[in-house]
Every structure is written in structure tokens, then in C-alpha cells.
Amino acid sequence: MNRQEWLEKRHNFITASDVPAIMGLSKYRSPIEVWNEKVNGHTDENIAPAAEIGLDIEPVLVRKVGTILKCDAVWLGENLDVAFKVHPHYEYIAATIDGLATLDEQSVQRAEIEFPTDDIKPGTYIIECKTTSKWDGKEDIPQEWVAQCQTQMAVHGIDGVILIVLVMGYNRHYELRFIPFDKSYWDDHILPKIVEFWTYVQTETLPPVTSPDDVDIIKSIYPNVNDMVIEDNELEDMIDRLNQLKEQRNTLDTEIALLEGELRRKGENYKAILAGKYVVDFALQNRKETVIPAKTIKVMRIKQRKTN
């Protein structure tokens, strides 16, 4: 199976990389985005530069696992028939893994130094590669990564994932972690969400809105209006709440504008105002416009005062 065949095939499944979005853990995709991909085939063909770098560096990261742990580490990017697998009991759940590591007793000893744990034993484990500048290893592993790895383990029948992360930035370095399979988390939390979501896909029913960006997706899905009229009295409370929030927003927008205007009036001829714990700075800024002539505007910034 080549990469194009793999891309076409995984479209028909809920994959491990879809799971964080389905569970509401992803910062980049919502359940409705995934639903739109599965039902309408709407996918972004453009790979973000960061994601492209991540793909290019996968074989390097897999080899790094082998070097650090002194174990056999195999990158599966060119062996997608092995990397891609369907769950044995749920034919619509699938997962693709980056690599496999086989650890012997000596490798386990090295692993216990890298990530102290009693869960790792001699055997074969999944390798999952990540590249990021937003996690430096000091905090807990991001939950979206954990959910993805748990799905990979459930599908491939392997009880652990060795997570290798290339942390980008000034202090570039590798972070190695071990994620054991958590059966209760899979059975009680992840699997029910996938099953529920698959029902939305099969019935072509939109899942609940979870992101402001979902509105634009819904507009693109349903661009036309037919002659049908439906009645749904359960929406009355929702509409009441919507109207209430709009009124509050208008009131807040007006109050914000008045307060900002008064601050600007007070600082009309000054560089800054010292106001208790705050500093209000004023500066002239040249704004280049393409439609109207360029002009100089007065910019106001509010900051907290530095205390010694």
C-alpha cells in the first residue's frame, strides 16, 4: 500500500489521529470538522509546514529511540501494510503507527532510567513521534497525545507506546516517555465517544457544535434553503439565551468603548498615565493602508506596572 492508497483508505475509518478531535481534546480540529471530512470528503490537502517537518523527521526520531534505548527500532513509514491496522472488533476504527521498538532486558534497564516506570517489560512497543515547541516535558503529556496513543494500542493489540518528542526552539532537545495501555480509559471514555461519533457519521447527522469555527463549516455544508418548515419548541430556551447574550454583548461593547474613550481623553497630551498598578502608554504609529491613504494613529496600551 503506497501513501496515496493509505490516505484514501483511512478516510473510511475513525483513525487514532481523529480521536482527540472527537473527544474535544484537540486545539486544531473539532468533531464537526472530522464529521465533514468523513461524510462530505472535505479535507485540507495542504500540509502545514510544522506537520510536514514532523513527517520528514519521523525516521530520524525512530532511529533515535533505538540509539537511546539500545534496542531494535523500525520506522514503518514505508511499510504501511504493517503500520495501518483495523480494530479486530470494530471495523470502523483504525490506527497507523510510526514505528515499533523491540526491547530486551538491557533495553528495559535503559528505559527505566529514561522514564521511571514499572510497566515496561521486554517486548515490542509502538513508537509515536511528535514535534512541538509548545511542550517541554515539564508538564504532563498532553491529553490529546494520550488519547491517540491509547487508540493505537487498542487497535494494534500492544500494551505500551514509547513517545519520542523533538522539542523545538532555543533549547532544542528530545523527550522520551512511556504510555501504558489504560483499559478502563479506553473502555469507559474513548470507545463510547468513537461509537457515538460513528453513529453521527452513518446517519449523516451533525454532531453538536463545540467551536466558533464550526459555524462557517455548517454554512458551507448547507448553503441552500428549501421550502420545508419544522417545529422544535425545545430550541426556545436556546434562542432566549442567545438573545440575552447578544444584549449583554452590546452593553459590554458600549461600556468598553466609553471607558477606552475616557482613558484616551485623560491621556490626550501625555506619553503615559500611571494609575495604581497599571501603566497606560500612548504612542504614535504609522499605519500603511492599501485602500485609504496612510495615516498616523495614536495607539493605547494598558500594562501592569513592574514592582521591585
Image (tube, grey):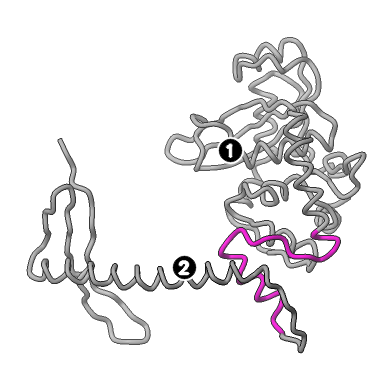
Residue drawn at point x = 62 percent, y = 47 percent = 25
Residue drawn at point x = 46 percent, y = 67 percent = 245
Q: Which residue is mark 2?
A: 245
Give the quadrant of residue 267: bottom left
Drawn side of residue 271 relative to residue 125, left or right: left
With respect to residue 252, does 26 lie above or below?
Answer: above
Name which residue type carries label 2: Leu
Place of residue 256 in the rendered image (x, y in percent of width and height, measured from the top left) = 29, 67
Q: Upstream in the sequence, badge 2 or badge 1?
A: 1
Alpha-carbon neighbours of circle 1 within 10 Å: few (<14), some, or many (≥20)?
A: few
Select label 2 or label 1 by which is in front: 2
Residue 215 magenta-highlighted: yes
Mark 1 element type: loop
Q: Give the residue at the far bottom of this rendering.
A: 227
With respect to residue 127, does 144 lie above or below?
Answer: below
Residue drawn at point x = 86 percent, y = 55 percent = 9
- The residue closer to the viewer here, 248 or 17, is 248
Mark 2 element type: helix
Drawn side of residue 162 relative to residue 115, left or right: right
With respect to residue 162, does 250 lie above or below?
Answer: below
Tell me the magenta residue range.
Answer: 200-224
Residue drawn at point x = 71 percent, y = 77 percent = 222
Place of residue 55 in the rendered image (x, y in percent of width and height, measured from the top left) = 67, 47
- The residue closer to the viewer here, 293 or 246, is 246
Place of residue 115 in the rendered image (x, y in percent of width and height, measured from the top left) = 61, 20
Place of residue 179 in the rendered image (x, y in percent of width and height, measured from the top left) = 68, 28
Q: Which residue is mark 1?
A: 142
Give the quadrant of residue 264: bottom left
Instruction: Name the image quarter holding the C terminus.
Output: top left
Give the quadrant of residue 40: bottom right
